[in-house]
């Protein structure tokens, strides 16, 4: 069918060589799979946040697949991609998805207070970093170095990589409904050393101050991954 060859096992019985009469039974040796139907099956399992994702399966459209064999498909949305295998369970074409969760549900955002160690996960639920905001320090600056919004707030952050090639996520302070990025520069030695950003591999650590220019002493710190998802919150 459209280039796909489907083998069929023919079992003959009760053969009468004198009359030429016989009985036979036909059985599919493989399952004939329409990958368009596979695409529809995968799309039907996608959650709301992946409603615009596209699904592509390895061509050709029609595939003769052995029981236990699989068809590889890719689910894509923006820069995010997930490989899914449809494993064929029987010659009728019934199959199941591996992984069963086609589009992983993001773990809940870790939340704590100053001093708490929070674990940061990726969208697949794998642990990436352990991050602790150990202390906060405030300064009104001096006559030569004044914060624009009223206060310099330093957060001392320690990071421990649980996987390779980890980037320290950006942090911001949420105060009065407004986000303030952690890139304030002050000449004060009170916030020395600044944390040094860069890639961390498994077991490596980084520590230092992140400084914010904020209008008040109360709010929360938010850590975001490269896709802009909040992965950690410290309330203070």
Image (cartoon, rainbow, N blue to C red):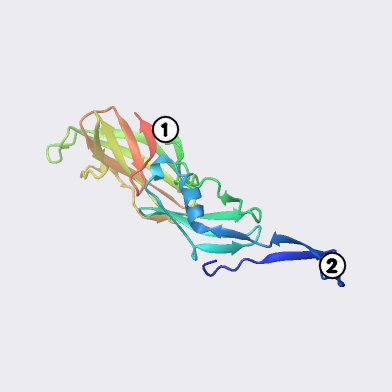
As drawn, the residue found furthest toward the front would be 19
Picture disc at residue 36 = none
Image quadrant of residue 222? top left
Which quadrant is home to the C terminus?
A: top left
Up the image or down, 180 lies above or below 74; here it is: above
Dot in front, 1 or 2: 2
Quadrant of the rendered structure where residue 22 is? Answer: bottom right
The front one of 236 and 69 is: 69
Q: Nearer the viewer, residue 29 or 128?
A: 29
**How many numbered marks are there?**
2
Residue 5 pos. (x, y %): 59, 68
**Mark 2 Cα shell of 10 Å, populated few (<14), some (14-19), many (≥20):** few
- Residue at the bottom extreme of this rendering: 18
Residue topped by disc 2: 15
Give me the residue at 21% from left, 45% from top: 185
Residue 76 visible in rendering: yes
- The x, y position of residue 151, in whole percent, is 21, 33
Structural distance between the alpha carbons of marks 1 and 2:
76 Å
Image disc number at residue 111: 1
Disc on the earlier residue, 1 or 2? 2
| Residue nearest the observer in this picture, 114 or 181 | 181
Q: Quadrant of the N terminus?
A: bottom right
Q: Is mark 2 on a helix, strand or loop?
A: loop
Residue 133 in percent (x, y) is at 38, 37
Closest to the observer, 182 or 27: 27
């Amino acid at each position: 069918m459209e280039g796909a060859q489907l083998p069929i096992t023919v079992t003959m019985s009760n053969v009468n060589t004198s009359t030429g009469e016989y009985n036979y039974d036909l059985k599919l040796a493989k399952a004939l799979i329409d990958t368009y139907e596979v695409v529809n099956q995968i799309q039907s399992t996608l959650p709301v946040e992946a409603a615009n994702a596209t699904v592509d399966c390895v061509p050709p459209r029609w595939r003769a697949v052995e029981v236990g064999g699989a068809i590889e498909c890719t689910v894509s949305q923006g820069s995010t991609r997930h490989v899914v295998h449809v494993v064929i369970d029987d010659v009728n074409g019934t199959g199941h998805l591996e992984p069963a969760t086609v589009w992983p549900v993001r773990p809940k955002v870790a939340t704590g207070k100053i001093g708490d160690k929070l674990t940061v996960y990726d969208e697949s639920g794998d642990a990436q970093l352990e991050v602790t905001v150990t202390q906060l320090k405030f300064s009104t600056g001096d006559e030569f170095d004044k914060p624009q919004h009223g206060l310099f707030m330093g957060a001392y952050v320690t990071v421990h990589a649980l996987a390779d090639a980890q980037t320290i996520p950006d942090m911001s302070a949420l105060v009065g409904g407004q986000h303030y990025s952690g890139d304030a520069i002050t000449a004060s030695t009170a916030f020395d050393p600044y944390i040094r950003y860069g890639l961390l591999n498994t077991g490596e650590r980084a520590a230092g101050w992140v400084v914010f220019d904020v209008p008040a002493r109360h709010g929360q710190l938010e850590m975001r991954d490269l896709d802009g998802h909040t992965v950690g919150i410290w309330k203070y």
